[in-house]
Amino acid sequence: MSGATALTPHYRRVLIKLSGEALLGQEEYGVDPVVLDRIAAEIDELASTGVQVAIVVGGGNIFRGAGLAAKGMDRVSADQMGMLATVINALAIQDALERRGMYARVMSAIKINEVCEDYIRRRAIRHLEKNRVVILAAGIGNPFFTTDSAASLRAIEINADLMIKATKVDGVYSADPAKFPDAERFDVLDYDEVLTRKLAVMDATAVVLCRDNRMPLRVVNMNQPGAFVRAALGENVGTLVTAG
């Protein structure tokens, strides 16, 4: 683990939301070890500033419950399979962090005690206070909720000061910048505007949770080196979404 830096973070505790697809890299399925190691290095750099770090990871690189449900599979069963996929990703992230000499714990919203801990809010906070990275898997343990909603809920529960959503673009745009080159990028938004304009930040449930609990969100490009640290320092990176 890298030594502590002289930087003074603006936020004491952050939660990072990683999509499962972010772990794909150049692979067609599963986890790209190169991407995994790069993400671990970014998290190591962030933790070295003294910031307490929690992570919520999706499972779309392995299994998308909503997709199979749309093709006829029982939605509850499909979502439960998706939750298990997030546990696989969480264990991969834990391993990558531990190979860097960091301390990390995987906590699952569904019982899978042979491989990780149950999610217990107070225990998660205690891990964070001991400067362990906490990787929160299996969503909220219930079907019909996205991992974006799980990230919002967990950020609120653990008293995070900021939620960081790691994406493949450098913020929130008025439209998909890959399809519309003239799309406008926003520096700052409020949650009501996100809902009114139906901007592709997170699903509506996740947005409302953050808005009603005044949880600030910063959307950053995970492929931009140092983006997590810059966000934790309070720098103007990506797009900041607030409760107004």
Image (tube, rainbow, N blue to C red):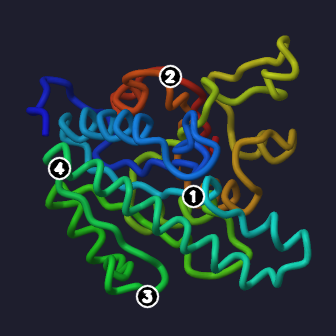
Q: Looking at the image, is mark 1 or mark 4 earlier in the sequence?
A: 1
Q: In the figure, is residue 162 to the left or right of 198?
A: left
| Residue topped by disc 1 | 58
| Residue topped by disc 4 | 102
Gap between marks 3 and 2 measured at Cα: 37 Å
* Disc 3 residue crowd, few under 14, some 14–19, many 20+, Cα 10 Å: some
**Label of residue 111 in the image:** 3
* Disc 1 residue crowd, few under 14, some 14–19, many 20+, Cα 10 Å: many
- Residue 52, given in percent of the width and then of the height, sits at 26, 50
> Which residue does the image show at 84% across and 28% down from the upper left?
175
**Label of residue 237 in the image:** 2
Quadrant for the N terminus in the image: top left
Q: Looking at the image, is mark 2 or mark 4 earlier in the sequence?
A: 4
Gap between marks 2 and 1 measured at Cα: 23 Å
Gap between marks 2 and 4 measured at Cα: 26 Å
Q: Looking at the image, is mark 3 or mark 1 earlier in the sequence?
A: 1
Q: Looking at the image, is mark 3 or mark 2 earlier in the sequence?
A: 3
Q: In the figure, is residue 140 to the left or right of 124?
A: right
Residue type at mark 3 is Lys
Above/below status of 215 relative to 67: above
> Which residue does the image show at 55% across and 28% down from the upper left?
221
For label 3, the SS is loop
Q: Closest to the observer: 90 or 162? A: 90
